[in-house]
Image: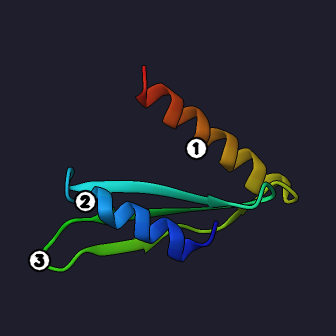
């Protein structure tokens, strides 16, 4: 799924909430995106994280754990 596809789905979700997080991945690389409702919607692409890179993979696990904790 490309960043454009994620932005399209996330933008549609702004009708129901003020901000949205999205994720595009190919299984090795992970790209998070944050959209915020404003006069004109604003989006921010987060740095791409890769499972191949050790530091990136540690960050990715930390982000995913934090997301899981939000759900609890």
Q: Nearer the viewer, residue 63 or 29?
A: 29
> What kind of element bears circle 1?
helix
Compared across the picture, whether 72 is left or right of 47 comes to: left
C-alpha span from label 2 to label 1: 22 Å
Which of the numbered marks, if any, corresponds to residue 63? 1
Residue 47 point in image, percent of width and height = 60, 68
Q: Nearer the viewer, mark 2 or mark 1?
A: 2
At a point 56% along the width and 73% down the height, the residue shown is: 3
Q: Relative to residue 13, is residue 48 depicted above or below?
A: below
Q: Nearer the viewer, residue 9 or 27?
A: 9
Residue under label 3, please give it: 39
What is the crowding at mark 1: few (fewer than 14 residues within 10 Å), some, or many (at least 20)? few
Residue under label 2, please give it: 14
Residue 15 point in image, percent of width and height = 20, 58
C-alpha span from label 3 to label 1: 29 Å
Q: Quadrant of the N terminus?
A: bottom right
> What kind of element bears circle 3?
loop
Compared across the picture, whether 16 is left or right of 4 comes to: left
Residue 72 point in image, percent of width and height = 42, 19
- Way the structure is coloured: rainbow
At a point 34% along the width and 55% down the height, the residue shown is: 20
Identify the mark nearer the N-term, 2 or 1: 2
Quarter location, residue 44: bottom left
At a point 88% along the width and 58% down the height, the residue shown is: 52
Quarter location, residue 8: bottom left
């Amino acid at each position: 799924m490309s960043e454009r596809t994620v932005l399209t789905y996330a933008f549609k979700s702004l009708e129901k909430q003020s901000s949205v997080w999205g994720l595009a991945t190919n299984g090795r690389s992970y790209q998070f995106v944050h959209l915020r409702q404003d006069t004109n919607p604003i989006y921010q692409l987060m740095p791409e994280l890769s499972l191949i890179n050790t530091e990136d993979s540690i960050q990715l696990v930390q982000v995913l754990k934090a997301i899981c904790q939000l759900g609890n």
